[in-house]
Amino acid sequence: MDPKDKKVNPDPILEEDSGTGSAADVEAVMKKYDRESNTRVWTGTPGLIIKILGILFSCYCIFSTLKGWPTLPEQKLNIFLALILIMGYLHYPIKKGMTKPNSLPIYDILIMIVGAVPFLYFAYKANYVIQQASRITKDPMMVVFAILGVLAMMELCRRSVGIPILCVLGALLVYTFATTRFGKVIYDLFYTPSGVMGTPINVCQKYIVVFIIFGAFLERTGISNFFISLANCVAGSSSGGPAKVAVISSALCGMVSGSSVGNTVTTGSVTIPMMKRTGYKGEFAGAVEAAASTGGQIMPPIMGAAAFLMAEYMGIPYSHVALKAILPAVLYFTGIYIAVHLEAKKLGLKGIPKDELPKFSKLLPKIYLLLPLVVLVVLVSTQIRTMQMSAAIAIMVTIVVGVINNFVNKAANIDDPAEQFTVAKFFDALEAGGKSTVTVAVACAMAGLVAGCITTTGLASTLITTIVKVSGGQAIIALFLTMICCIVLGMGVPTTANFCIMASTCAPILMDKRIGIMPVAAYFFVFYFGIVADITPPVALAAYAGSAIAKAPPMKTAINATRLAIAAFVVPYIFAFSPVMLFEFEAGTSSTTMVIQSVLIVVTSLIGLFGIASALNGFLYRPINPLFRVLLIAGGLGMMIPGNVSDLVGFVIVGGVVVLQRMGAKNGAAA
């Protein structure tokens, strides 16, 4: 789904509360923090032509992935990349702020043609290139084509994705060319599956594109409004309700959107003003939305489309990836929920009056809006159909649900354009899906080049050796150093490319026998820490977007978001040492034992999270003194470290502090 194509409903709160951004401010935030929103302005006949091209591109992607045409991978991927370049340069100008309508400079036309031709020529001469193998680099024209194709793709990445990923790639390219024969580098990075045509772009073309289009259709059924209304029903009236609504709705919307920044802006335009009106500070309101929206990328079953890449890298079915992600995601959002609740209690905040909330009885009849997601999960998990076909069927179900929703709204006299599924929205969804595909595909192409550089130079083994040497073979030190690498490499990088880079550079370090982390746990570990880069200073794009809407200091918002998402910094260590959280058990473990182990690790982790969240917030039943805060952190960490002794010690500490706080609060009230 394309975040910028989501229609943000102008909430009255936005206009009434001068302490939050207006609807126009939201659009400005998108353009500032979300590269995908900095697109050319097309109107009139040129706009219609561009729209038709986008629709045709989406249709081609669906047809290609379902029919497997062309059959030769080299042809299929190169045609796909050529079309990505063409669509990309039609939409993204050379710099921000170029909003002149119907403007396509001659230099962009030249770059677009010069960049697309090498890929199209490769597709045309695919059999010849394959036969020639590495000898193809003896032809100067083929070498020039490879260089032009890669440079054009890198420039499109700069325009649509951002510079951080190019900094990583640029450093690796310099190292690669300095240590490896020129011809081998060109051949590996452009003409083999070890570079731009690597696993990331292959998975993107094969699976992710059709799921992006599915997300675009799903958004146009009004499901986002349904998620927000559902969250209001569940938590809106409780203490500090709007913040809890933000946590729940952003988790649900974020897993589909695939963009931390996009979801922060679109969902936050509704939830952040509500939080500020309730009494939360701006930096806290923006942080809640940013932390929850970022967590949407780890929320199964969609996980921002990264689940499909994870399945490919780990060599397990997609349904298994979604299943393994459940408990960590529950802990992540529970941790934020606890922090939000404690903050509300500390500030004495109330919830939204019940008479202002939607009634569950009126919302229940619209439960059919979830049908496309249910169908998708059932088809994929049961493997009745391929993932591509499952997504295509889900798209058709979404269209049917949209039509049904029209009749339901008409019968209920609901006249909300945001919930009307029209023919125009059908074509809008196809166009938006095509536009969103551009940024994801470009990021995947760059991730393929990153992986290619590492493979060609053997840099992975050098990194592994260095980390093992520095850590002295101690897993906890290796995990900490890997965490730092993931956060640095993940700054400003989209979800899908983020995982590809982490899987290529950081996961092999943890899977080394001298460190001993299980492969599944290693991949999840690096994925989590790559994702939280969006809320970790100094490059916390999601937090900065939230701060812009809340009109709060960006760095304060980022620090608050990091504090709220403390679970994301602790939970990965838990499943690294105890993969039971990922439903990884020792051979021969009985079903009963599996259930007991899973329940125990969730319960102990939740108690531990409660202790840490309380300490960081500084309030339980009353303000917590510094000594008790230290004890709560120690006890919380003890509960989260696998082991019966540490669990018992942690439980005694956390439980003891909670009892003392409770007694102190009662005595204070009595006095």
Image (cartoon, helix red, strand yellow):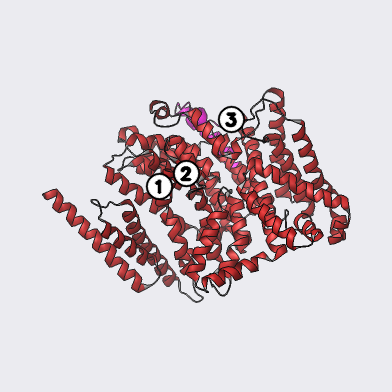
Whole-number angstrom distance, CA of label 2 to CA of label 3: 34 Å
Q: Residue at x 49, y 74 (%)?
A: 586
Q: CA distance from mark 1 to mark 2?
A: 9 Å
* Nearer to the camera, 323 or 569: 569
Q: Amino acid at mark 3?
A: Thr
Q: Amino acid at mark 2?
A: Ala
- Kindly check if marks 1 and 2 are in contact, taking CB atoms under 8 A apart as contact: yes
Check residue 400 for magenta coloring: yes
Instruction: Name the N-terminal-most of marks 3 and 1.
Output: 3
Image location of residue 65, percent across then percent down: 70, 49
Q: Residues within 10 Å of mark 3 (few under 14, many from 20)?
A: some
User: Can residue 474 be seen?
Assistant: yes
Q: Nearer the viewer, mark 3 or mark 1?
A: 1
Along the viewing direction, whichever of 560 and 248 lies nearer the viewer: 560
Q: Is residue 38 above or below residue 82?
A: above
Left or right of 358, for residue 404? right
CA–CA distance in space, label 3 to label 1: 41 Å
Give the prevailing secondary structure in the magenta stretch: helix
Q: Which residue is mark 1?
A: 560
* Residue linked to disc 2: 543
Tell me if label 2 and label 3 are in contact, CB under 8 Å.
Answer: no
Which element type, helix, strand or loop, lies under badge 1? Answer: helix
What x and y, as percent, mark residue 515? 54, 72
Q: Identify which residue is drawn at 58% across, 71% down.
A: 512
Which image quadrant: the N terminus?
A: top right
Name the quadrant containing residue 138.
bottom right
Residues rendered magenta in the picture? 396-422
Check disc 3 and report the residue beneath it. 422
